[in-house]
Image (cartoon, rainbow, N blue to C red):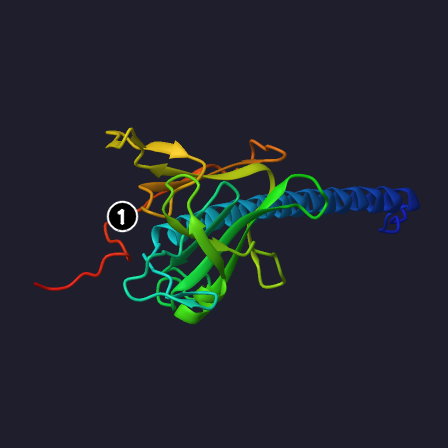
Amino acid sequence: MKRRASNAGVTLVEVLIAVTLLSLLTLGMLMAMRIGLISLAKTDDKLMSNRRVEGAQRILEQELEGLIPVGLATCGKTVFPSPSPLILFQAEERTMRLVSAFSLQQAWRGQPQVLELFIVPADDGRGVRLVVNETPYTPTAAGNQCLGFGPDPNSGLLAAHFAPPEASTHSFVLADRLAYCRFSYLVQGARGGVTLAQPTWQTSASSAAWPVAIRVDMAPLEPNPSQLQPIAVTAPIYIHRSPQIEYGDY
């Protein structure tokens, strides 16, 4: 007598177990993908932040190294003969004004710009930010920024006085969320009418001579060792020409 063949198939319990295992496997894959995407987003944010810091510091260094010795043709309504007795250079601890061959929009290929680098409080009141204004250089536009002139408090020589720079929608933020930011200048000092052998760092520079180097000291408000932090930028100034002297071929 032959046995009756059993019907091929699976039971309901086996189906439930298979569905449960498939769901757990799918959930594990989704969780792994989510963790991977979150890690990718965090890494991308850190890379973008590092690139912004590196790019801003490179821009700042190139702007300072592109300094052009320019004399003021006018100061307000006063017109100076050539060579001008005043130079377009403001060197203070929180404000710096100069003419540079480097442009944010066209790099080294653009028109010379009058740069206003200054420090303002952050929008939320925490820390400070470093801001720069760019204005295409023309003798007339440069003269309009001059409010007047008088003796320099450090050297006693004639110096120009400029209007305080103001942040606007066209201003570019070079560094934000800083604990502090200040400018210093490596200048050749003098004592008792004798020029010192070694230049020294000072918080301001006389308008009678160009500094040997310019340094921008800054530190982050919230240091993060896992990211690139703003650090001091030092740019050498290779200028041996004075706009107050008329040069010619002999």
| Residue 228 seen | no
Residue 196 sits above or below residue 108 on the image: above
> Where in the figure is residue 86, as x and y percent of width and height?
36, 56
Instruction: Tell me how many marks there are.
Output: 1
Please indicate whether residue 195 sits to the left or right of residue 205 in the image: left
The residue lying toward the viewer, choosing from 38 and 162, is 162
> Where in the figure is residue 231, as x and y percent of width and height?
48, 37
Assign the C terminus to one quadrant of the image: bottom left
**Amino acid of disc 1:** Tyr
> Where in the figure is residue 8, as x and y percent of width and height?
84, 51
Query: What residue is shown at x 31% (from left), y 33% (from top)?
Result: 189
Please indicate whether residue 47 sits to the left or right of residue 14 in the image: left
The residue lying toward the viewer, choosing from 92 and 109, is 92
The residue lying toward the viewer, choosing from 231 and 238, is 238
The residue lying toward the viewer, choosing from 223 and 100, is 100
Residue 205 sits above or below residue 104 on the image: above
Q: Residue furthest right?
A: 12
Query: What residue is shown at x 63% (from left), y 48% (from top)?
Result: 41
Please indicate whether residue 191 sits to the left or right of residue 96 in the image: left
**Label 1, residues with CA under 10 Å away: few <14, some 14-19, many ≥20:** some
| Residue 185 seen | yes
> Where in the figure is residue 158, as x and y percent of width and height?
38, 50
| Secondary structure at numbered mark 1 | loop
Assign the N terminus to one quadrant of the image: top right
Which residue is disc 1 drawn over? 238
Residue 83 sits above or below residue 175 on the image: below
Query: What residue is shown at x 71% (from left), y 42% (from top)?
Result: 125
